[in-house]
Amino acid sequence: MKEHHYQSQIEWTGNQGTGTNHYAKYERSHTIQVEDKPLLAGSSDPAFRGDPTKHNPEDLFISTLSSCHMLWYLHFCSVHQVIVEAYTDTVTGIMIEETDGKGRFTEVTLHPVVTVQQQDMVELALSLHQKASEFCFIANSVNFPVQHVPTIKVREG
């Protein structure tokens, strides 16, 4: 078994001069920095007084699930000689917020649209989504199932 370590630095940048002295008087802005990578500007979701032009944890969370699935999927396609020429995903998630303010995601659904090189690759390409789902580190770390509703297309021409 291997152990992998990750580190990022989060810095709150939303102090308007009075700190958190009042719920409505500080920004939720922050930066996310991982060494040798571009700085990400973050905030909370607009529903929680955040800046709608910045990344929020919920968006990043569902994007991470999608990205992990895609990377495993492309790996398994390569290993099985399924030639993928394009891959997009529109990932959706549902988070419930309880009356006391606690919340959690109850579902995330991936909607990958994959273009493969040849018609005879379609069936295997479709089945490899399940294998990718089984191997995705992030999906294996959440307490709800990550669904996938894939569409496989064949390159035109």
Image: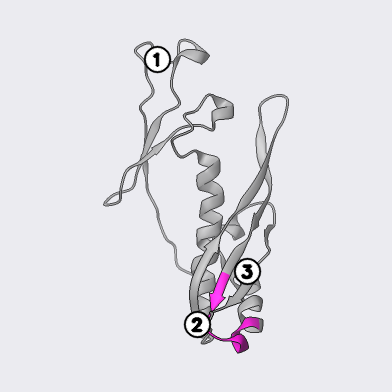
Q: Earlier in the sequence, mark 3 or mark 2?
A: 2
Q: How far apart in space, not on screen, are marks 3 and 2 (Cα)? A: 21 Å
Q: Residues within 10 Å of mark 3 (few under 14, many from 20)?
A: some
Label 2 residue SS: loop
Q: Residue at x 45, y 67 (%)?
A: 2
Inspect the image, locate mark 3, and give the three-letter code of the amino acid beneath it. Glu
8 up-or-down from 130: above or below: above
| Span colored in magenta | 114-122
Q: Residue at x 49, y 71 (%)?
A: 86
Label 1 residue SS: loop
Inspect the image, locate mark 2, and give the three-letter code of the amino acid beneath it. Ile
**Residue 115, magenta (yes or no):** yes
Inspect the image, locate mark 1, and give the three-letter code of the amino acid beneath it. Gly
Q: Residues within 10 Å of mark 1 (few under 14, many from 20)?
A: few
Q: Which residue is mark 2?
A: 83
Question: Marks 3 and 2: which is nearer the front?
Answer: 2
Q: Residue 5 sits in which quadrant?
A: bottom left
**Residue 86, magenta (yes or no):** no
Q: Residue at x 56, y 71 (%)?
A: 114
Q: Which residue is mark 1?
A: 19
Q: Which residue is mark 3?
A: 134
Q: Residue furthest left?
A: 36
